[in-house]
Amino acid sequence: MTTGGRGLLRRLADWSPAGLPITSIYLTVDGRRFPRKSDYELRLDELVRHARAAGEGLDRDARRSLAGDLESIVAFVRDRFERGSTRGIAMFSCSGAGLWEALLLPRPIRDRVAVGGEPDLLPLEALLETYPSICTVVVDHEKARVFIAALGRIEERSELWDDVPGRHDQGGWAQARFQRHVDEHRQKHLKRVAEALFRLFKRRSFDHMILAGPEEAVAELERELHDYLRRRVRARITLPMTASADDVLARSLAIEEELELDREREKVERVAQAAAGGGRGVAGLPATLGALAEGRIGELVVDIDLSVAGNSCASCGRLVEDGGACPACGGRLEPVPDVVEAAVARAIRSGCRVETVVSDAVSRLGGIGALLRF
């Protein structure tokens, strides 16, 4: 079991299954949407049935390997998986070739199953592309701890110490002079922290910043930050300098979730306004599929649970919800179990940004919409 990201993608992309199928299953286990374990286990059962159906035409060795895959996946979800803060799972298995990976995700992901010669990495690639990284700085006037969180994993990058003289109780001129000395050291400390953060940002860019610690120290550090970093500050919170990495991650993920909901609402509003004004936006499945076929989509916005049976043109590949013939070339239409899933995959392959929306805000678009390139 792993919480890795791009490293796992590279390993899976390079995996050789020796002619056997790789089973890929994505499952949402979000406790906000599925409070009982049995809720997401029912969805897993459905995905397993689809996988078995996909393997009906395989040879004996491939079917045996697929059966082992599904046994491992079901056993992991039912017996070994502890949900905690996990909201999605991506599982990849080829039992006949010794492949097993389970990726725990801090964000829900569309349920999906694929059985083929390569792992189905498109949803994971899309998630990595859109998932923000967060730099959380726990700071006081003497010390700083810097954490980078991405895709549910947190890493402490550095510890910065400064020998700051303590305050003392003597009064008079000596006390005033000593206090100035203390204040100078504290200012230098926070300036060095700000400089170290900017160097880190230039080496490894991050999307958001959270500043944590005593209010006075946080405010002083923010004033010292480079403008690039000040614009990334999303929250100021209280955390003790002794906070564990798990505590920092929990607070960071809670803030990230609030930011994500705000971002979803803002994105849906942009699409709705663009579509209503006759500008570069479409709403609803028919209009979105039409724009996709024309290569006009720049960013797709879709409800995580939207699933609609549809059709694909055997001649030009155009996706449509229904109809007897292709509206573009008049070709024969073939059924597609989920035209929304097919549209998402095609959008990702064509370089579109895909935003999977968990909140009900996207219902005003009919569950799906897009911002257009032209």
Image (spheres, rainbow, N blue to C red):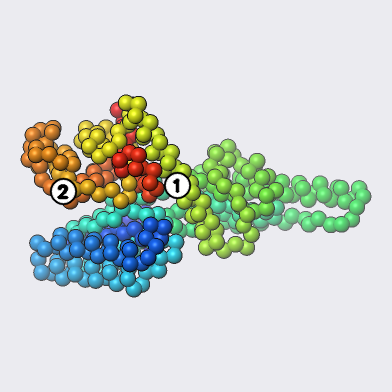
Pick whichever of labels 1 and 2 is earlier in the sequence.
Answer: 1
Tell me where residue 204 appears, x and y as whole percent. 48, 48
Res. 162 image quadrant: bottom right
Residue at 86%, 47% (x, y): give it: 177
Provide the secondary structure element on which disc 2 rests.
strand
Residue at 72%, 56% (x, y): give it: 163
From the viewer's perspective, is residue 36 above or below residue 150? Answer: below
The residue that mark 1 highlights is 260
Q: Is residue 116 visible?
A: yes
Q: Residues within 10 Å of mark 1 (few under 14, many from 20)?
A: some
From the viewer's perspective, is residue 219 above or below residue 42? Answer: above
Three-letter residue code for mark 2:
Val
Q: Is residue 8 visible?
A: no
Q: Residue furthest right?
A: 172
Res. 119 image quadrant: bottom left
The residue that mark 2 highlights is 336
Q: Is residue 63 left or right of residue 266?
A: left
Residue at 19%, 69% (x, y): give it: 67
Tell me where residue 212 appears, x and y as whole percent. 61, 52
Q: Is residue 137 left or right of residue 98?
A: right
Front-lying residue, 274 or 189 = 274
Q: Is residue 245 left or right of residue 276?
A: right
Residue at 61%, 45% (x, y): give it: 195
